Amino acid sequence: MRTSVKGPLMFSAFWGVLVFFAVLIFASGGSGHSPRFDLAFTGGGIAFIVSLVMAAMLSMSYKENAEHLGKGSGVNLTSRRPGSHGGAVPGPASSGPEKPETPGPGTN
């Protein structure tokens, strides 16, 4: 329905007819006056054109996601690495406390 012309035309025609009848009823000013078909056609035409332009702009702005975006294992949203010091996520079973890092060469 998104790629065909039929959907936006039906959408715009619905709003054009709705506005036509609304203006025809409310613009006459009561049952003692004749219906204002000139204002009804003008309002219906404006509603049709505006809704058709909006539907066209929205359909042109639609873009499918790239195929590679749906694949993969996801994103790691935590700043801690599993099994790191003080992490809430337990790492693999360890045998005893962690050893402190030894300083590298050239450090005091």
Image (tube, rainbow, N blue to C red):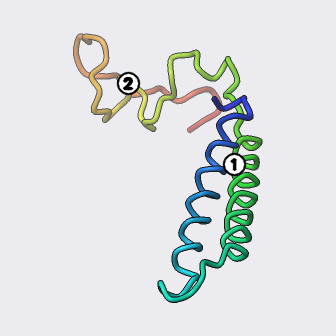
How far across and down, in percent of the image, does residue 42 sit?
74, 71
For label 2, count other residues whose C-alpha is less than 10 Å away and answer few (under 14), some (14-19) or many (20+): some
Q: Quadrant of the C terminus?
A: top right
Q: Nearer the viewer, mark 2 or mark 1?
A: 1
Q: Quadrant of the N terminus?
A: top right
How far across and down, in percent of the image, does residue 23 sit?
59, 74
Residue nearest the observer in this picture, 107 or 31: 31
Q: In which image quadrant can residue 96 be found?
A: top left
Q: Amino acid at mark 1?
A: Ala
Q: Relative to 48, is 72 above or below?
A: above
How far across and down, in percent of the image, does residue 68 sit?
67, 18
Q: Amino acid at mark 2?
A: Pro
**Tag 2 residue:** 82
Instruction: Give the left or right position of residue 61, taking residue 83 as reference.
Output: right
User: Residue at image x 70%, y 24%?
Assistant: 66
Instruction: Give the left or right position of residue 35, taking residue 83 as reference.
Output: right
User: Residue at image x 56%, y 16%?
Assistant: 72
Q: Relative to 18, is 38 above or below?
A: below
Q: Secondary structure at mark 1?
A: helix
Residue nearest the observer in this picture, 94 or 101: 94
How far across and down, in percent of the image, does residue 49 sit?
75, 58
Q: Are marks 2 and 1 in contact (CB under 8 Å)?
A: no
Number of the label disc, if any, that sits on residue 55: 1
Q: Secondary structure at mark 2?
A: loop
> Disc 2 to disc 1, how far (Cα)?
48 Å
Residue nearest the observer in this picture, 28 or 77: 28
